[in-house]
Each structure stands twice: as structure tokens, then as C-alpha cells.
Image (tube, grey):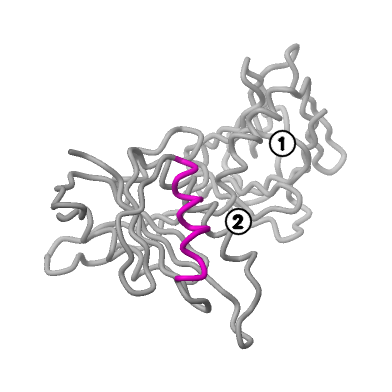
Amino acid sequence: MKATVLFADVSGAAISQCIGQLRSAAESTGGRVVKLVGDEVMVVFATPDAAAKAAVKMHQCIEALPAVAGAEPALRVGFHSGPIMRRDRDVVGDTVNLAARLVQQAQKGQTLTSAPTAAELSTGMRPFLRDLQRVALVDKAETVRLCEMLKTSLKGAARAQEAKAKTMVRLAYGDQVVVCSRETPRIVIGRHKDCALVIGDKLASRQHCTLEARDDGFFLLDHSTYGTYVTFEGEQEILLKGEGLALARHGWIAFGHPHGGSAEAVEFSGS
């Protein structure tokens, strides 16, 4: 059978203090805790989406715990999807081994998955992925590309609903202001003079990205060479590469490089 296997490793706190919260986070998205291995918990999910959502909730639970002897509790998570074999109450196989390898590669506060598993995530989850380096698998010559699952992923579905409720999105860049609405459903942004919003940044592509009004909200679609960086106010910056993202509330769009307060960023606001 096929499943998604997740390992979560706790540091700065005893696993016994955290297992109840980790179990609740796992079960809230349909996961089943298989076993404890030292400071790690192993969970099986039906889909990569369920594992990704549980990972976000797990991080939130552990980060809310108080420091112990000056050490802040932290969590590392790795998950991979593939065929598994059941052995009594345990689960074994290459999928389990790779998931265990991924959690070893993760840093504190980080969730890693494999590129093949990332490709199985739903469209709404993919904008919250960041490609990392290739690493060698245990006892094998082949390598696998790692992807980081950003902890803002749970907010994606809520943001899409918020975008759907908006009637317009306003874009401001220097003295230029354009509005995307049902009446003007497509705004092209880029360096080319024929774009609806012309960008002066040298790293911007001629037609860098497009903002579209759809039945299910307002979506920014990247077409660029170097990527589109989106920052929602109060959240971590998101890099889009050939992907789409629902725009809502207030934030900034940067072209080919992080925002960092750049004057070349476009400010957006929904209403």
C-alpha cells in the first residue's frame, strides 16, 4: 500500500512532554502515530497534504512550549510518500527509511520533504515549497532533491478564501496605480512598456507576472526568469517560480530578489 510517512524529532524538551500534543496534531489531519524512536515520533498519513498540514500544527504546538533550562523547544520534521509494508503494528520499507533520513537533514524549526512527494501536494500547498539541494540517500548511489515546506502553509487555504471575498486588488508602484477587478480581470506586470504596470527593476522580466481575477479569487502567476517574491504583512516571504498564489489583504511583490524594503517593490492591497 502507499502512504506518507512522517518523522518529527523534538529537542529542548522531553518527548514524553510533547507526545500528547504531537499526537493531537497528527490525528487532526487523519494521521496515525505508529511508534516513538528515542526523541522522534513516527506517523503515517494517507496523503502528503495531510502530513504537511500536521507538520505545521506540530511546529506551532512545540514552539508554544516554555523554555527548559534556557533551551527553547524545537521540532524537526521530515516526510516522504511511497509504498510501505506493515509488520505487526510497525511500518517498514524504503519510504520509511527515506523519511527518517529527511528528518536527520532538517534544521530546528524546519520541515523537509522529497521533490517527488512535493509534486504530489495539492496546487494550494505548492506555493509554500522551497527547493533545496540534492543529497545522497542512505546506502544508495542515487540522490534526491529536498524541498522545504514553509510554516505558512496552513494559512494558504484561509488566504484563498479571503482572496475570493475581495472585489478588487489595488497595485501601487511609484506614481503608477492599477486595479484588478471583475471589470479589469487581468493585469500584466513587467519591464516591457506595454505592461499594465511597468517595473524598472533590472531583475524583472519583460512580462514578469500576471494578476488575474477568477471566480475563486485573485491570483498572482509567475512567468519570470528569476522568480517573484511575495510578502504578506506580518508573514514570511514566499518565492514563486512558475507558480500561482492567492493575493489578499496587504503586502508587497518584488521581482527577481527578496523585498527587503526595496523601492522597486509593488505594494498590493485587497478590498
For badge 2, the amino acid type reads His
Q: Residue furthest right?
A: 175
Question: Number of marks in the image?
Answer: 2
Magenta part of the chain: 16-29
> Closest to the observer: 28 or 267?
28
Marking on residue 198: 1
Disc 1 is placed on an element classified as strand
For badge 1, the amino acid type reads Val
Query: Is 84 left, or right, of 210 in this rendering?
Result: left
Residue, disc 2: 257
Other residues around mark 1 within 10 Å, as few (<14) / some (14–19) / many (≥20): some
At x 75%, y 45%, the residue is 251
Residue 81 in picture, x, y percent from top left: 28, 46
Residue 162 in picture, x, y percent from top left: 71, 30
Marking on residue 107: none
Residue 240 in picture, x, y percent from top left: 53, 44
> Closest to the observer: 173 or 98?
98
Quadrant location of the C terminus? top right
Is 64 part of what is drawn in magenta?
A: no
Q: Residue furthest bottom?
A: 69
Is 20 part of what is drawn in magenta?
A: yes
Q: Quadrant of residue 262?
A: bottom right
Quadrant location of the N terminus? top left
Secondary structure predominantly adopted by residues drawn in magenta: helix
Query: Is 232 left, or right, of 89 in this rendering?
Result: right
Separation of marks 1 and 2 at Cα, in angstroms = 17 Å
